[in-house]
Amino acid sequence: MIVYLLCFTLFLVGLYGVLTQRNLVKIVIGLSIMEISIFLFFTLIGYIQGAAAPIVVRGQVETQFVDPLPQAMVLTAIVIALATNAMLLSIAIRLYRKYKTFDIREMRSLKG
Amino acid sequence: METPISILLGFMIIGAIYSLSARDLLSAVISVGIVGYSLVICFLLLKAPDLAIVQIVVETITLVIMIAVVLDSTRIIRPQKAKGFVYFRYALSLAVIVIFAGVLLYMWSAPDLLQVFGDHTTRMSTAYIENAANATGSANLVTGVLFDFRGYDTLGEATVLFTAVVGVVTILRLKGKK
């Protein structure tokens, strides 16, 4: 059970980073930490003690497999997380070129 | 299996906290690599080789992009003196600490709702496991689920990926207004 709690703790660390950091790169890092904790949580749920990896081998005796459904979902999510992170970082580069800083306090003309 | 994953998770939490508190952005990016690559080992321990392969590629690409972003900049975060409202800031951080502790306490009750770790029963994917090899012809069940049973999911994923690539190209190519 302790693994689930450590997973939640990792999520909270990422959330803390997103809420408190003033640097754009640090905010992206916090988001990616949150994503990683969610990936690990899904895979932890699908794990079965003593089961084999979900790959069928010819001539294999009947064995139990780890749940393949959470793994397939996490596989989708990892690729989407890469895409969103790349997009966030490209926005950060644009803002850096305009304001010469990653600090969100100094981007005054973004204020509504 | 629970102990090595717990140790790795503790390692990941330390790396995450360090990367959020580092002054130099380059060391922050490198220590977020600790988190990503520890996740690869966790996937291997959890019998998910496909995820481990994908995660190691994705983590490397993310690290390369982040380092490219950081090396292009001044890197060092200059701490700024807080102006005014000192007591307000203290009160705010106290409130945040209380809220986080509350959320964590609430999450302590969540594992009771989940099944015990390592004691999962496949409900939805039983049919997938039984039929995947014959129905899809794929020896790898994850691939069978991803590209056959849930093919529309993968189509949506490809759409998101394409949109993100178009977005990145558009953002980086635009001429900024002076």
Image: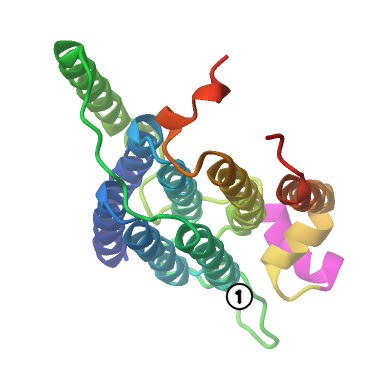
Relative placement, left or right, of B10 versus B68 is left
- The disc numbered 1 marks a residue on which chain? A
Residue nearest the viewer, comparing B66 with B83: B83
| Tag 1: amino acid | Glu
Most distant residue in the bottom direction: A59
Query: Is the residue B106 above or below the residue B27 in the image?
Result: above
Q: Quadrant of the rendered structure where residue A13 is?
A: top left
Magenta span includes B129: yes
Q: Residue at x 49, y 69 (%)?
A: B47
Q: What element carries label 1?
A: loop
What crowding class fits label 1: few (fewer than 14 Cα within 10 Å), some (14-19), or many (20 or more)?
A: few
Relative placement, left or right, of A86 versus B37 is right
Q: Which residue is drawn at 40% across and 45% down?
A: A26
Q: Please provide the residue range marked out in magenta.
A: B125-137
The scheme the figure's colours follow is: rainbow
Magenta span includes B174: no
Residue nearest the viewer, comparing A4 with B89: B89
Q: Residue B132, percent across and down?
A: 76, 64
Relative placement, left or right, of A64 versus A59 is left
Q: Residue B55, percent across and down?
A: 55, 66
Relative placement, left or right, of A72 versus B64 is right
Q: Residue B28, percent across and down?
A: 34, 57
Q: Quadrant of the rendered structure where residue B81 is?
A: top left
* Type of secondary structure dominating the magenta stretch: helix
Q: Mark 1 points at which residue?
A: A62
Q: Residue B140, percent across and down?
A: 70, 72
Question: How many numbered circles does the render carry?
Answer: 1
Query: Is the residue B74 above or below the residue B39 in the image?
Result: above
